[in-house]
Amino acid sequence: MTQQIIIPYSPRPLQAEFHRQQRRFSVAVCHRRFGKTVMAINWLLKEILTSKRKNAKGAYIAQNYGSAKRISWQMLRDYAETIPGVKFNEAELRCDLPGGKTIYLLGAENPDSLRGMGLVAVCLDEYADMNARLYPEIIRPSLSDYGDGRCLWIGTPRGDNQFKEIYDHAISRMEDSDPEWFAMRFPASETGVLAANELQAARDTMDESQYQQEYEVSWSAALIGSYWANAIDKAEAEKRICPLPWDPALKVHTVWDLGLHDSTCIIYFQLHKSEIRIINCFEASGEGLHFYIRELQSQPYLFEKHFFPHDVMVRELSTGSSRYEMLMALGVRPTVVAKLTVQDGIEAVRAVLPRCYFDRENTKPLLKALRHYHRTFNTKTSDWNAKPVHDWSSHFADCARYLAVGLRDDGEDEDYRNMARTGMMAPGKPVIDGGDGVFG
């Protein structure tokens, strides 16, 4: 006869919702004081107690050993102490359960020390603060010993890092109806766990970015000075970052940022009514134009416009030809985007982002760059620097600027045509009428 064990845990409604919906791989993004560690400890207890594996082992892993002992050890004792035959080893932070089963509390400071444990269930608490090698190199293989090991990631956002990546992966798998993945996100303004006056009191004494990160679980809050991070957060909240299949009935446009000694980026998009559907992106460096033309040819799309920055017209001293002429010779007729200041281009992107839809998988590098693109704060003048930081995100950010300006000026965009008809704005003219591209 199966023994019934009662654990003294009364989950809040959203905690109970998590327990009902959790899968083999689950991600819970939680605001401060949500009760995520309590939820995780009880998840782990149930997984190990109900496991059919002999001598099943589970692990709760915090960012360091001190946190595991200070925050979670007493919680584990409180909830497990009613289990008949349970023993606690505080020196090793180990809970011995009936049937030879064990739960360990561990720190993530030295990932290699956790190799070879053969775990049935693992919780990674504040995964954003852990070594990025920990899960893929050490924990994931340990979950394969029995073919059904389970993992729970919990934490508060720390910007765009491995915690965001595993959350995005879980959402993507859920959208594909994968029964093994699940994710939930719990902002304080929606959970009702903390009273409104308490949230306001916290907000009054915190920097807004700190509040958004800690209480509203914003992935972008840590990116101080980001131009478009809030717009990308809004796109995600409005489910405009989603599976977005290519529609063969619509032509595909491209927009390019041409690099000489650094990256060249391409964005693929389609237009439908007021929607800008960004279906794919590509980035490479150290390659000639022939390489990128082969990239276009490898796609199944029917192409129309190819937008390029104004410097495509500049002649190279070594050949005497411009890249515009080279592209024409290779079968691509560029539509050249008007030259604007960087700030004007940034504002143009900000204007079109509310109408953009992104394919979650195919545009990951673009989305990451758009979140990150930022300016810095000048502590000497106590003001923001005028120019954005030039780093890895600049190439896709430049590409996005050319997309926004190109649509504004080209007349292909139905929204802009409608505004022009009603007198709300007067569309400009492209520097060069690109016409139809050759491919397709």
Image (spheres, rainbow, N blue to C red):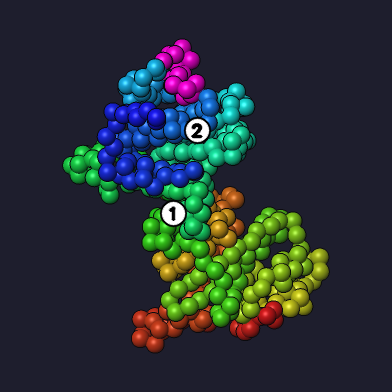
Sequence-wise, the earlier of marks 1 and 2 is 2
Check contact, mark 1 vs mark 2: CB within 8 A. Answer: no
The crowd level at tag 2 (other Cα within 10 Å; few <14, some 14-19, many 20+) is few
Q: Report the residue marked by disc 1.
A: 229
Q: From the image, tell me which residue sits under label 2.
A: 52
Q: Which residues are magenta?
A: 87-105
Label tally = 2
Query: Measured from the top left, where is residue 358 in percent x and y?
Result: 50, 64
**Which amino acid type is shown beneath numbered disc 1?**
Ala
Q: Is residue 164 above or below residue 395?
A: above
- Compared across the picture, whether 327 is left or right of 303 comes to right
Residue at x-position 76% and y-position 75%: 330
Element at label 1: helix
Who's the residue at 36% across and 85% down the image?
A: 423
Cα distance in 3D space between marks 1 and 2: 45 Å
Of residue 64 and residue 436, the one placed in the foreground of this image is 64
Query: If the image is split into quadrants, where does the N terminus sit?
Result: top left
